[in-house]
Amino acid sequence: MSEITQEQVTHLASLARIALTPEEIVSLTSELGSIMDHVATVTEVATPDVPATSHPIPLQNVFRDDVVGQTLTAEEALAGAPDHDGSRFRVTAILGEEQ
Amino acid sequence: MAKLMDYDRALELFEPVLGFEVHIELSTKTKMFSDAPNYFGGEPNTNITPVDLGLPGSLPVVNGQAVRYAISLGLALGCSIAPTSRFARKNYFYPDLAKNYQISQSDEPIAFAGSVEVELPNGRLFTVPIERAHMEEDAGKLTHVGGATGRIQGAEYSLVDYNRAGVPLVEIVTDIIYGAEADAPELAKAYVSTIRDIVVGLGISEARMERGNLRCDANISLRRRTPEGEPPAPLGTRTETKNVNSLRSVERAIRYEIQRQAAILDDGGTITQETRHWHEDTGQTSAGRPKSDADDYRYFPEPDLLPVVPSPELIEELRAALPEAPAIRRRRLKAEWNFTDLEFQDLTNSGLVNEVVETVAAGAAPAAARKWWTGEIARTANAQGVDATTLVTPLQVAQLVALVDAGTLTDRLARQVLEGVIAGEGTPQQVVDARGLAVVSDDGALIAAIDEALQSQPDVLAKIRDGKVQAAGAVIGAVMKAMKGQADAARVRELVLERATALPE
């Protein structure tokens, strides 16, 4: 059984801005543990000569030429916005700062 | 107003320890991961594609030119280029990026382990260790509305323009920098200035700090000095000062933080690990966000992008194309121009080395080129509060110097011509013609003026005839005045002495 703690789940939930009830924390702790265990079965077949990979297909160096393409208009960009001022997205007041 | 300790006293008690993160906006035509124009400005939210908005179904594709630029920069910083480097998602919740993450690089940066040689105003050479340089994307621009000051605190809502979102960035991170000592503020300025020179030399960024093309976050902590023979004290808690938008601010911010932290530590207080904001107007920093859970960015490999595996051939091609390193270039120019340490340092500090290079290339003597740029032009720029490079071109300065060399202009007249050039009246020659500023080289006109001056001051004339040559000054002054300054004083002097003996008693 993987060692996922309730503290870790609480921490992750706060990083992800997800409000969890105490019951959900308990159940998620156990579910995430099971998922971790399941994923860990991979390590049973992985030998030291198998390098870690971040992508299922062994491709690399897929680049784009530096050529300008089609852009959106401001109207198109804002079409799905819950709120805007005609040219910019409008978001609720933000506590905290720019990263 | 924070309590500050005297700077020299702070240095007696503490050793400053530095670290810098410099962000460079690359001047590619398109963004890092989308083919939107890399152009911040214009109508909000027009230089964007679905990728920049993180719309469902959109996929990022790496800009090959940005990768080449990043490799060139890495090489110029003396870094090793990673055989394989990967992009990662840096997760955070802030609407300056629409995706809720920034595509960056975490543990596999494109370039790592380099160093940059920096020359300080006092002539000291300092090697700044570079930990890494990695590729990432810039964020959009937020405007906070409501509240008293337009700042975040008290804002009712914020407006977001994503034109800048996705602009290619390279972030250069130094290792911990020890040993700067009292030069720490100057080192900070010189380091950022050197980085700017490097990226400008590579032609990969506009590198205008006031426009945010080049941004510096300055980390600083103080370490208490221990008596000789005792082990060094542990490193102090650091602060990270952001929003430093000019070379001068970098220097001032470091000096301020040294004095502020020293006062707190000496009073027995502790430094809070936090970001601090630099305020150009007051010359102070203020507390920002404390470092906390929010810095847990949950990096993971970006599944939408593939590894970057530059071939050794590409790396060597880019290495061969590197321009001369700024430190080596400075040494070469100083020798070629035969400048003293002080002269060259003045020039370097003025930031006008490239202008002098171009002025010399346009035909001017190095000493004359330096004199005009660091003298009259720099003074005028300072008085007008603008960049000297915006006033005149190196070609115009070279033309001005040529007119002086040819005897058409005296220095005094040349200053008037320069004023005309700066005022947009045309080339130096056009200003000379339009304002009628050329030196009167017609001896006839000069002699007439000299004779008149001599005859109106018979006592002076007598003194000159008695061999009191220094008396000629009064006549020369009168003649120069009569010629409205448009005469060569040395020639006038020659003629005055000649006429004093030639005139009838």
Image (cartoon, coloured by chain):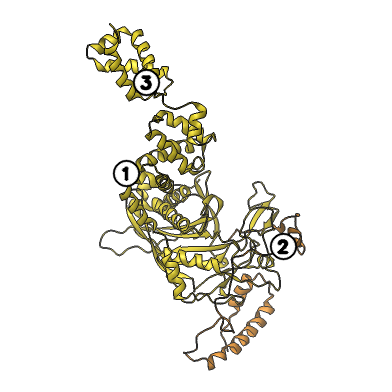
Chain colours: A orange, B yellow
Q: Is residue B460 above or below residue B147?
A: above
- Residue B405 in the image: x percent, y percent? 37, 35
The residue lying at 46 percent from left, 76 percent from top is: B83
* Real-space Cα separation, disc 1 to disc 3, in angstroms: 41 Å
Q: Quadrant of residue B312?
A: bottom left
Residue B487 is tagged as none
**Residue at mark 3:** B443
- Nearest to the observer: residue B281 or residue A28: B281
- Check contact, mark 1 vs mark 3: CB within 8 A: no
Q: Is residue B391 above or below residue B326?
A: above
What is the three-letter code of the residue carrying label 2? Leu
Q: Earlier in the sequence, mark 1 or mark 3?
A: 1
Q: Is residue A59 left or right of residue B382?
A: right
Report whether mark 1 lies on the same chain as mark 2: no
**Residue at mark 2:** A72
Residue B342 is tagged as 1
- Residue B295 in the image: x percent, y percent? 55, 67
Q: Most extreme residue toward the top, as rendered?
A: B505
- Nearest to the observer: residue B88 or residue B470: B470
Q: Chain of mark 2?
A: A
What is the three-letter code of the residue carrying label 3? Asp
- Nearest to the observer: residue A22 or residue B114: B114
Q: Is residue B236 left or right of residue B420?
A: left
Judging from the image, what secondary structure is the residue with disc 1 in? Answer: helix
Question: Around disc 3, counting alpha carbons within 10 Å, would you say few (fewer than 14), some (14 to 19), or many (20 or more)?
Answer: few
Report whether mark 1 lies on the same chain as mark 3: yes
What is the three-letter code of the residue carrying label 1? Leu
Question: Around disc 2, counting alpha carbons within 10 Å, would you say few (fewer than 14), some (14 to 19), or many (20 or more)?
Answer: some
* Real-space Cα separation, disc 3 to disc 2, in angstroms: 72 Å
| Mark in front: 1 vs 3 | 3
The residue lying at 75 percent from left, 61 percent from top is: A78
Report whether mark 3 lies on the same chain as mark 2: no
